Image (tube, helix red, strand yellow):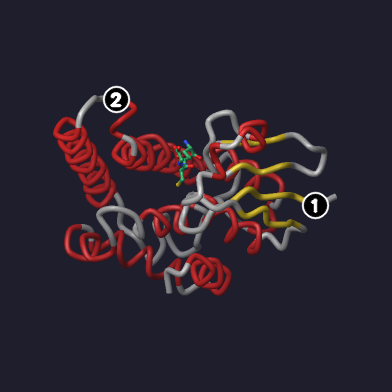
Amino acid sequence: MSYRLYAAKQCGSAVVEALLAIADAEWELEELDFDSGELLGEDYRQVNPLAQVPALVLPDGRIITESAAIILTLVERFPEAGLAPPAGTDARAEFYRWLTFLAVNVYGEMIHGDHPERYVDGEDASAAFTKRSDTRARGHLATMEAALEPAPFLLGERMTALDPYLAMMRHWRPGPGWFAEACPKLEAAAQAAEAHPQVAAAWRRQGWT
Ligand SMILES: N[C@@H](CCC(=O)N[C@@H](CS)C(=O)NCC(=O)O)C(=O)O
């Protein structure tokens, strides 16, 4: 009765690895090689037709894709892990807000920038597209920086799933240097999350520390 996580190093599966460990869930890792194009193969498309990671197979065999859906599933199934503020509270509503914000606006924009060929033709147009989507992702992070007062975590004294979710994105474009300079409050919250032993272990596996 184990969870199975389809993952690739330095991808969106990193946060799920950390959360499964924090929740002390029984799980196994199905690691795919992103660079060899393994995600694009027919076998993995049976798991996720979008050929993206993460994907989490539940103990009953059901497949859950989309990082936010996976995080919410773990929040609900492992309440003792405290991955979110208590259900029904205002803080929980705020958790939903920023989880969705990160998934849709920040992560979404970064993935658009990774794959300009899906939207425009030609090298110049692709470079311009990636530049524009990176600018939008930075703008979204700046919005978050202005809205939150981490203490020391994004929503207060307790780490929630939001913190490692953001901390993971800090390792993507534009990278930790930009974060520290442009979003010092988010940087501090990400660093606090990375000090958590299970987050630190998951990050070491990605080669981020
Ligand atoms: N909306 C998805 C995005 C997942 C995603 O784009 N993952 C990247 C790795 S970080 C990926 O698999 N990219 C391959 C592709 O889009 O072809 C989620 O939140 O899980």
Q: Which numbered disc flags the more N-terminal residue, 2 or 1?
A: 1
Look at the numbered disc 2 and give the secondary structure of its residue.
loop
**Res. 38 mark:** none
Q: Is mark 1 within 8 Å of ligand 1?
A: no
Q: Residue at x 65, y 36 (%)?
A: 64
- Amino acid type at image mark 2: Tyr
Q: Residue at x 22, y 48 (%)?
A: 142
Up the image or down, 22 lies above or below 87; here it is below
Give the side of residue 26 with respect to residue 72, left or right.
right
Q: Residue at x 62, y 55 (%)?
A: 31
Percent of width and height locating residue 16: 58, 53
Between residue 67 and residue 78, name the one nearer to us.
67
Give the side of residue 40 with respect to residue 25, left or right.
left
Res. 149 image quadrant: bottom left
Percent of width and height locating residue 114: 33, 41
Percent of width and height locating residue 39: 55, 42
- Amino acid type at image mark 1: Ser
Between residue 179 and residue 128, name the one nearer to us.
128
Look at the numbered disc 1 and give the secondary structure of its residue.
loop
Q: Are discs 2 and 1 less than 8 Å apart at CB?
A: no
Up the image or down, 164 lies above or below 125; here it is below
Up the image or down, 158 lies above or below 56; here it is below
Res. 143 image quadrant: top left
**Res. 2 mark:** 1
Badge 2: few (under 14), some or many (20 or more) residues near its Cα, within 10 Å?
few
Between residue 25 and residue 80, name the one nearer to us.
25
Between residue 110 and residue 18, name the one nearer to us.
110
**Res. 119 mark:** 2
